[in-house]
Amino acid sequence: MAEKQKKKYAYLTKAVQLPDGTRKYLRAKTQKELDEKVLKTQILVNSGVDICNEETFAHFAQMWYDLYKKPYLRENSLEAIKYVLNQHILPVIGGYRLRDITPMQIQAIMAGLAGKSNSLQSKVLINLRSIFKAAQENGLVAKSPVSSMLKPSGKKTVEKEALNAQERQLLLEWVKNPRARTFLLIALHTGMRRGEIVGLQWEDIDFKKKVIHVRHNAVMGRYETTISENMKTKAGKRNLPLSEDLEEWLVARKKTSHSKYVIAMENHGPLTKSSYKSMWKLIERELPDTHITAHILRHTYITQLFESGTLDVKEIQYLAGHSTMDMTLRVYTHYDRRTREAKTAEKVREALRVQA
């Protein structure tokens, strides 16, 4: 039997001249298809796009990360970007050429995140917009496929609640592990950030003047912890008063310490990410029904300062290490709203009792 002949197509071709004088040959099966390709190519060329570039999204995203992000961000921020790229973006469009990615593909990424948190969706959109903006600036796409109409949906993160007096007391009574208790006391009595506490050294504490000099910050990576004097904000370097309870505890701890770090591992080095997580479980287990993070402990300290009524907002801003007044006022607004709600509820109950 004679082998069946494959159907052959007579392709139509047309050359488009590029800015550098070279020609790009296009081909199609029909005149209509060829005309559409020529028009699209001319639009891209006139927009300054290098149509000969075969750059994939994955390769360009890596360059974007190395040049636009890695030199300027801290380890934790970089890890967050890598997670978003590797888990939610690259699996969908990583292998496509940059200029071939469509708004529908971006929509598919966001559709795949339906039901995920508002925070995660926001991070995905922010990184996509940043990458395609860089691609556009470098002449690799004419227009970003990330529509300005795309907005993150999903459940918003629950607003952080400060621990109440009973919860604070229970933690201080029940957490007995020396390392965990030291972290807890420092956080509740100074409002220092997690990295500031992990990076705190004995030389930073002036027991004579009863002051903690916040001068070091720890970035806990996957395998090692880096200590530097680069604080999270310009206002990060500050001097904090040492409370009597915290002073008493730290004086006793210093007598048995063999490390330059106030909270150290068995090898006398600063906490790593894994050792920090192990320590934190000792704190969490004491109040299993209450969501506790290092930031909530810090939030609790700042709220207590407002509740005292003895410090003005500018003083609290300094103690918190906030670079702007707005950051401090956000905490105050949350505290003030909760206080008003409680007072209003009591007034309503009182009104109903009078009527009865």
Image: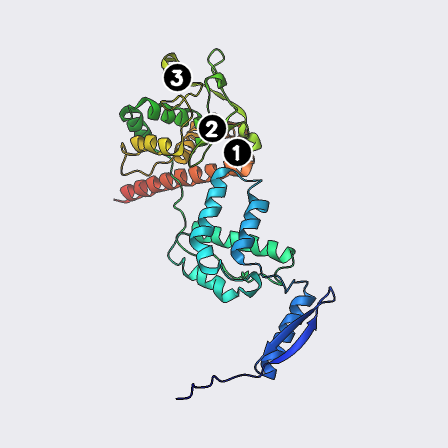
Q: Where 237 falls versus 71 (above or below)?
A: above
341 sits left or right of 106 in the view: left
Residue at 42% across, 41% down? 337
Q: Helix or strand or loop: what does disc 2 sit on?
A: helix
Label 2 sits on residue: 196
Q: How far across and down, in percent of the image, does residue 213 sit?
A: 51, 21
Is residue 277 shown left or right of residue 82? left
The kind of residue on which mark 3 rests is Leu
Q: Which residue is drawn at 48% across and 50% down?
A: 123
Q: Are marks 2 and 1 in contact (CB under 8 Å)?
A: yes
On the image, which quarter does residue 48 sit in?
bottom right
Question: For residue 250, which numbered disc appears in the image?
Answer: 3
Mark 1 residue type: Lys
Measure the C-alpha gap from mark 2 to mark 1. 9 Å
Name the N-terminal-most of marks 3 and 1. 1
- Please say if the residues under marks 3 and 2 sit with CB atoms less than 8 Å apart: no
The image quadrant where one finds the N terminus is bottom left
In front of the other: 30 or 133 = 30
Residue 298 vs 26, above or below: the answer is above
Name the mark on residue 338.
none
- Amino acid type of the residue tagged 2 in the rendering: Glu
